[in-house]
Structures are given as structure tokens and as C-alpha cells.
Image (tube, rainbow, N blue to C red):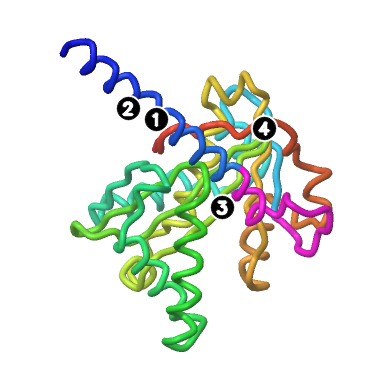
Amino acid sequence: MTFWVGAVSAACVVFATIKLRSCFSFSSSFSLIPLGLSTKRVKKHHAVLEIDGDDPLDVYLRDVKSRSISSTLLKQVPKALKQHNVTVKSISPHQMSFEHFLVIYEHERNNYAVLKALLVSIARFLVARSMVGVIDEYTCDGRVCCWAQTIVKGATLRAMWFYQNRQARNSKLFLWFDTLKSSILRLGDGTLQEKGVKFIDLGPSQSAGAVAVKTKFGFNNSLEWREICDYEGEFLQPPQYSR
């Protein structure tokens, strides 16, 4: 009896391991598509920046030489999060739920009518949930109000998706700026530094205003983002959110 219990337990462990590996393999392969790495054709400009140093936030602030940027990241962002009692935790993309879908839907309603916003939101939720990386989940008043996805491949950290609901947007919580700060801080992680991760790719922008903001914060909006960044190499697990 003990033998069979042990055999069944071992079989379950092997099956679970194979399943997890196959899921990761699918997520890794699938992630190349939305990352824009599955084809040689480059259609969109990306906002990219190289930060090389043991203290990436200090290096970044020293390089941009802007009191306004320093004030935003070091004073206004923490103040807004504390004032509105915003909490943040990192979860796996596969842990995303209906709450995260609703955030996408409210975000997309700014751009589309109800039906199109719904269809776009379903597609983007399924895409994000099927990818590798980590999700930073922002909660306000016990409700998920925003989330952002981070992926690391090769020497590049990609700030992949960012969505916030009406509450977060109307309250001016500076959440996008907090995700930017978090991306910079992640470059200081020991494991990522050992692997030579030193590029941040904020991806394409949907508006001229977004391009202007990223440019103001020191990022180069370039069609040659693949040549600037180094995506060669394996996917790496991003560190947990840190403030």
C-alpha cells in the first residue's frame, strides 16, 4: 500500500512539473509576439533608455538633471500613494482575475465605444494572462485600480502593459510614474545586474502626448529599438515590486 501511495505521489509530482514546464514554454514562445520579437519587421517606435550602474535610480536622476523629474519620482509619487492608501503587490500573470479585466475595460472605454472596448479588453486580458513576467497590482480602497506587467529578456527590462481605472485616473495617483520608478529600481536587483540587464524599453506610445512625456523623462523614441536594446538571451524572472 505504501509503495502505491508513493508511486502515485511521484507520478503526480512528475505530471505537475511537466505541466508547469510546458506552460512556461508556451508563455515564453507566445510572449515573443506581443513583445514584437517574433518578426524581423519593425513597425513602431519604442521609448528606450540605457541605465548602467549599481544604483540605477541615482544614475538615472543624475543623467536627466531635472528637478521636476526628481520631485515627481521622489516626492509626488510617494505622497500620492500614501495619501490615497494605495498598496502594491506582485503576482504571476496567471493569477490575474476578473478584477484585472475590469481595469482594462475601464481604461479602454476612454478610447472606444462599449462593444469595441469589451472585445479589445477580452483580447488584451487573455494576451497578458498568457505571457511571462510579473504583474504589479495596485489596490485602492480594497479594489484593484491599476496593474502593470514587467518582462525581462536578455539585457532588457520591458515595461509591457499599463492599465488603470477611472478612479485611479481621476484621483491623479501618478501610478504610471510609479511603474517607471519601479522599472528603474528593478535594474538594481543583484540577479539582473549579474545578467547584465541595463536597458528599459517602455514600448510604443499611442499618442504624441505619451511620446512627449517619455522623452521628457529621458527616453529615446526610436525605430531602431532592437539595435539599441539587447533582447538576445533567455527570459528572466523580474524581481518583486519595490518602492
The magenta segment is 29-46
Q: Quadrant of the C terminus?
A: top left
State if disc 1 and disc 2 touch (CB < 8 Å): yes
Label 2 vs label 1: CA separation? Answer: 5 Å
Name the mark nearer the viewer: 4 or 2.
2
Residue 216 in view here: no
Residue 52 in view here: yes
**Quadrant assignment, res 56:** top right
Q: On the image, numbered disc 4 is attached to which residue? A: 198
Name the mark nearer the viewer: 3 or 1.
1
Callout 4, which amino acid?
Lys
Query: In the rendering, at what x and y percent does residue 48 appear?
Result: 70, 48
Residue at 35% x, 73% y is 166
The magenta stretch spans residue 34: yes
- Residue 15, labelled with which disc? 1
Residue 32 lies left or right of residue 241; in this view the side is: right
- Residue 12, labelled with which disc? 2
Label 3 vs label 4: CA separation? Answer: 16 Å
- Residue 160, labelled with which disc? 3
